[in-house]
Image (tube, coloured by chain):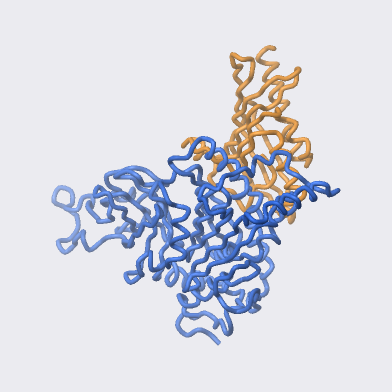
Chain colours: A orange, B blue
Amino acid sequence: MTETTLLETIARFNCVYASCIDENQLESWPEYFVDDCFYKVTTADNYQKGRPAGLIYADSKGMLKDRISALREANVYEQHSYRHILSMPIIKLESDGNVSAETSFSVTRIMRGGQMDIFATGKYVDEFQCCDSNWRLRKRVVVCDSISIDTLLAIPL
Amino acid sequence: MSNMQSGLPAWGGSTTNVPYWLYQDERVLAAEQEKVFQGPTWNYLCLEAEVPNIGDYRTTFVGEMPVVVTRNSDGEIYAFENRCAHRGALIALEDSGNAEDLACVYHAWSYDLTGNLKGVAFEHGVGGKGGMPEMFKKSDHNPRKLRVATFCGLVFGSLDEDVPSIEEYLGDEVASRVERVLHKPVRVLGQFKQILPNNWKLYFENVKDTYHASLLHVFFTTFRLNRLSQRGGVIVSESGAHHVSYSVINPDEKVSAEYEAEKLRSDKDDYRLLDPSLLSGIDEFGDGITLQILSIFPGFVLQQIQNTIAVRQILPQGVETTELNWTYIGFEDDTPELEEMRLKQANLIGPSGFVSMEDGAVGGFVQRGIRCAGDEKSVVLMGGEDIASADYRATEASVRGFWHAYRNHMGL
């Protein structure tokens, strides 16, 4: 696969990943990850200081699915949605055939009453793995630029 | 009718009815800054672990007052107002750092790490011209200094000269529950800030409110995670100001609990966690207490839910906004396995927490709900009118305790 094709592949992956969240298809969200995945939402401050905790911290696809069923069935929060705007990824082909990538994001949150805010900006720090010609995330660390979260972070980034 | 001293309306009644203007009035916030945060209270500033070395400093707040905490060359911790004595600008602009002294960027007045003014740029003028007059003494011009107390690695500060010792302030029962958790050196695992759309008191009440826990937070019940065998209670300090709520696994009920769990699994519309490793933990304190939420007036929380431990600092940012600072901690001697448990269980807490997400929003629901109800009052009667400790949690005793202490400080 040429680097241009790979770039397109990862960029396209990110577009449909974001669309899945923005269009409220959250049940499909875990399918963008391999079974033995790692997903964490943290801040640039914690990331730079090497502090391991996350706002969301999952080390299996099961935990991602649990996150969604908790959002659907258990957690209480006001209705809202996101709109992701993503940059082109910066990619690097690793010696083991996997791809590491970084992609910037900006997420606007739209509240029930119409209020719109830039809820988060930051970068995805990713490791992609190709399984049966499908690329999946082995690892996605969502590094938010700001140290603060307004009210709550329910829907994943 | 108004309160003559503060110009505030009168509370006019029992602590079981809390008037809503307390969450809305700018004058209340101003009075709180003076009487609560700068009054005879201990305010949580930071962890000792955040200023471990000589020269380390960290900026924080007492209410809305900006504060610098330092580790001076004598090894002691000092705290002073983060306000230059010259024109009032912030002295320290970073969240944290290490320095021999701190200089204001505006006109380069500099301070030692205990908050003493040491340097005034061009104090004697330039080329014999200008400079400060003879009568100016640097020692007359210092930012306000705080009294500092440390307890179990927590750093507290007070602006009041007559505040009781931290041990006396907490009381034996609350102090021993802090010691139970923070019994050895801690390590910071992460820090997060959450901005809440409500008055600071609504969040502090929420922390103390043992009544809402199983009603608002349905994560455990939805997933049929076994809570049946747990008993619990609430401790309210003598002053009412502080509280501890806890739940304990009752070992005698293990068998029936397992039976219940089996039975529940066969329920038709049963939601189960696909990966329950989220909840695997160990009884690291050896007393079966799986949950302990502890609050120290006016704005500190120590939380242990299984093996996830965090401290929270509650700060007002104006009348209708609250800053909630989370510091997730483990211990220096944690095994990698234990740290991993803490990190996974941390999914329960914080702005995205399965059991704390709602707390970020519910205060805003109140703030918006009471918009036109400043003269109305809430009902805080669950469990009666007293503020005593209890071996059950269907009570609002600790919320009443908060208001009891608050009224005393505010003179309301």
Left or right, B181 with respect to B17, comes to left
In this view, A18 is above or below B364? above
* Image quarter (top left, top right, bottom left or bottom right) of the N terminus of chain A: top right
Residue in the foreground of this view, choosing between A20 and B354: B354
Instruction: Identify the residue at image location x=49%, y=37%.
Output: B335
Furthest toward the bottom, the residue is B1
Location of residue B23 in the rendering, given as x and y in whole percent from the top left corner: 58, 70
Location of residue B205 in the rendering, given as x and y in whole percent from the top left corner: 58, 66
Instruction: Identify the residue at image location x=60%, y=41%.
Output: B344
Left or right, A35 with respect to B236, comes to right
Residue B207 appears in the figure: yes
Residue in the foreground of this view, choosing between B189 and B107: B189
In this view, B288 is above or below A39? below
Location of residue B115 in the rendering, given as x and y in whole percent from the top left corner: 28, 55
Residue B195 appears in the figure: no
Location of residue B24 in the rendering, given as x and y in whole percent from the top left corner: 58, 70
* Image quarter (top left, top right, bottom left or bottom right) of the C terminus of chain A: top right
